[in-house]
Image: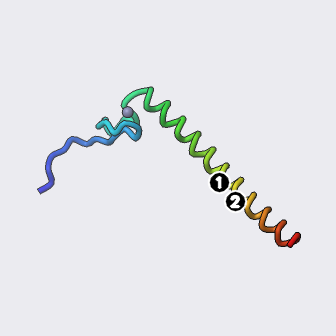
């Protein structure tokens, strides 16, 4: 039943089929991926900052009100 498909994976950026031994189809995609990771990390920091900000605002309003 299983069809014979040569072992392959997909480039996480553009979705091109690439050999399993490779992680990206090109250096361009590799760089894009690393930039994406950096952006995602930034987003996590921003999220934490927002949560802390909300907690601080709630705490302050609790003591003021
Ligand atoms: Zn790619």
Write the residue at 77% across / 67% down. 58
> Crowdedness of circle 1 by 10 Å Cα count: few (<14), some, many (20+)?
few
Q: Residue furthest left?
A: 1
Work out which quarter of the rendered image holds the C terminus and state it.
bottom right
Locate residue 57: give its quadrant.
Answer: bottom right
Q: Is residue 28 left or right of residue 1?
A: right
Locate residue 39: give its quadrant.
Answer: top right
Q: Is mark 2 within 8 Å of ligand 1?
A: no
Q: Which residue is mark 1?
A: 47
Q: Is mark 1 within 8 Å of ligand 1?
A: no
Query: Which structural element holds mark 1?
Result: helix
Quadrant of the picture in which ligand 1 is shown: top left
> Crowdedness of circle 2 by 10 Å Cα count: few (<14), some, many (20+)?
few
Q: Nearer the viewer, residue 28 or 43?
A: 43
Q: Nearer the viewer, residue 3 or 43?
A: 43
Q: Is residue 65 left or right of residue 52?
A: right
**Residue 1: percent from left, percent from top:** 11, 57
Query: Which structural element holds mark 2?
Result: helix
Vertical placement of 5 versus 53: above or below? Answer: above
Q: Is residue 38 left or right of residue 64?
A: left
**Residue 5: percent from left, percent from top:** 19, 44
Marks 1 & 2, CB-CB < 8 Å contact: yes
Vertical placement of 63 versus 40: above or below? Answer: below
Write the residue at 46% across / 32% down. 30
Write the residue at 69% across / 55% down. 50
Labelled disc at residue 1: none
Q: Which residue is mark 2?
A: 51
Vertical placement of 63 versus 57: above or below? Answer: below
Alpha carbon separation for disc pair 1 and 2: 6 Å
Write the residue at 14% across / 50% down. 3
């Amino acid at each position: 039943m299983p069809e014979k498909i040569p072992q392959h994976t997909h480039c996480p950026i553009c979705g091109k089929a690439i050999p399993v031994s490779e992680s990206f189809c090109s250096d361009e995609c590799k760089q894009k991926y690393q930039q994406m990771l950096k952006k995602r990390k930034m987003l996590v920091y921003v999220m934490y900052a927002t949560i802390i900000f909300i907690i601080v605002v709630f705490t302050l309003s609790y003591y003021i009100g």
